[in-house]
Amino acid sequence: MTGNAVASSLDCRGMLCPLPIYKTSVAIGRLAPGEVLEVVCTDPGSVADFAAFAARTGHRLLASEEGDGLYTFRLEKRAAG
């Protein structure tokens, strides 16, 4: 993980696909380029979903961690353009 501070957090516990990705898309749209969004999920499928979301959108997946049934992701909003 990089030293980027988290600008915003999103709690998606209890939600199943596609809600965590949809909510992440909305939340990251509110951030400035370079800011970091942290998302917490309970859906094991979110690991693949967030990797695909980052690859498709150009946002950088800084971290993907699992512990105690929680999946935590940190995404850096891509530069505009």
Image (cartoon, helix red, strand yellow):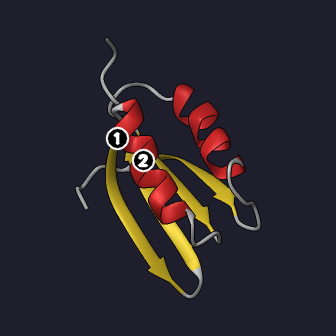
**Where 63 falls versus 75 (above or below)?**
below
- Three-letter code, disc 2: Ala
The extreme right residue here reads 14
Q: SS at mark 1?
A: helix
Relative placement, left or right, of 48 versus 25 is: left
Q: SS at mark 2?
A: helix
Residue 32, horizontal then vertical, whole percent = 43, 25
The extreme top residue here reads 81
Q: Nearer the viewer, residue 7 or 23?
A: 23
Q: Which residue is mark 2?
A: 52
**Image quarter hosting the N terminus:** bottom left
Residue 43, horizontal then vertical, whole percent = 64, 69
**Image quarter hosting the C terminus:** top left
CA gap, disc 2 and disc 1: 5 Å
Q: Residue at x 41, y 31 (%)?
A: 57
Q: Around disc 2, counting alpha carbons within 10 Å, would you say few (fewer than 14), some (14 to 19), or many (20 or more)?
A: some
Q: Around disc 1, counting alpha carbons within 10 Å, would you say few (fewer than 14), some (14 to 19), or many (20 or more)?
A: few
Assess whether mark 1 and mark 2 are in contact (beta carbons under 8 angstroms). Answer: yes
Residue 26, horizontal then vertical, whole percent = 63, 32
Q: Is residue 51 visible?
A: yes
Q: Nearer the viewer, residue 8 or 19?
A: 19
Q: Which mark is residue 55?
A: 1
- Three-letter code, disc 1: Ala
Relative placement, left or right, of 26 versus 50 is: right
Q: Residue at x 49, y 29 (%)?
A: 31
Relative placement, left or right, of 27 versus 48 is: right
Q: Residue at x 39, y 42 (%)?
A: 54
